[in-house]
């Protein structure tokens, strides 16, 4: 993880969505897209957040299945926030299985809820 991604993640964890965006706003790599998506969701820009999270999930390679699963869970949280219940639960169930298999219990619990 590079320093800008780490700084952005710390800012998000502290609740500073704008600070997080300052670190990754001009980047288009999958980790930056995911962090931008989460920040946009925190700012209430749900349509843009979902788009960024989908791009991030597609950008992660097959060897980064945990990161891809986390994007699926984050997108599901955004869908819940906008009360969009039309999505298929299959992707979320698959994400939960991946997260559980890799001992990411907190995100697996989010996927299950």
Image (cartoon, helix red, strand yellow):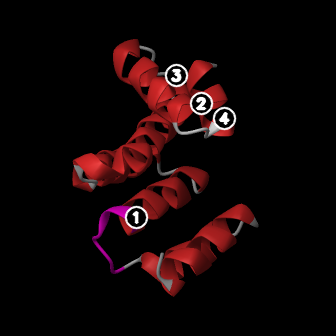
Residue 107: image tag: none
* Residue 14 position (above or below residue 41): below
Q: Nearer the viewer, mark 4 or mark 1?
A: 4
Q: Nearer the viewer, mark 2 or mark 3?
A: 2
Q: Nearer the viewer, residue 103 or 4?
A: 103
* Residue 61 position (above or below residue 20): above
Q: Secondary structure at mark 4?
A: helix
Q: Estimate the x, y position of residue 101 in percent, counting from the top left.
A: 51, 31
Whether the residues at callouts 2 and 4 have beta carbons within 8 Å, the answer is yes
| Residue topped by disc 1 | 31
Q: Which residues are magenta?
A: 26-31
How far apart marks 1 and 3 lie (CA) works out to 26 Å
For image coordinates 64% across by 19% down, the residue present is: 113
For image coordinates 59% across by 19% down, the residue present is: 112
Pointer 2 or 1: first along the chain: 1
Q: Nearer the viewer, mark 2 or mark 1?
A: 2
| Residue topped by disc 2 | 108
| Residue topped by disc 3 | 83
For image coordinates 42% across by 50% down, the residue present is: 67
- Would residue 50 be seen by someone viewing this image from the given angle? yes
Image-based side of 113 in relation to 64, left or right: right
Q: Estimate the x, y position of residue 40 in percent, counting from the top left.
A: 50, 57
Pointer 4 or 1: first along the chain: 1
How far apart marks 2 and 3 lie (CA) works out to 21 Å
Residue 105: image tag: 4
Whether the residues at callouts 4 and 1 have beta carbons within 8 Å, the answer is no
Q: Secondary structure at mark 2?
A: helix
Q: Residues within 10 Å of mark 2 (few under 14, many from 20)?
A: many
Pointer 3 or 4: first along the chain: 3
């Amino acid at each position: 993880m590079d320093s800008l991604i780490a700084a952005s993640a710390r800012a998000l964890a502290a609740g500073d969505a704008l600070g997080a965006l300052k670190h990754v706003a001009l980047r288009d790599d999958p980790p930056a897209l995911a962090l931008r998506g989460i920040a946009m969701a925190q700012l209430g820009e749900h349509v843009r957040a979902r788009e960024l999270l989908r791009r991030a999930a597609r950008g992660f390679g097959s060897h980064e299945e945990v990161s891809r699963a986390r994007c699926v869970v984050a997108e599901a949280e955004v869908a819940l926030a906008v009360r969009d219940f039309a999505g298929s639960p299959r992707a979320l169930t698959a994400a939960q299985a991946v997260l559980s298999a890799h001992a990411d219990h907190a995100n697996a619990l989010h996927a299950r809820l």
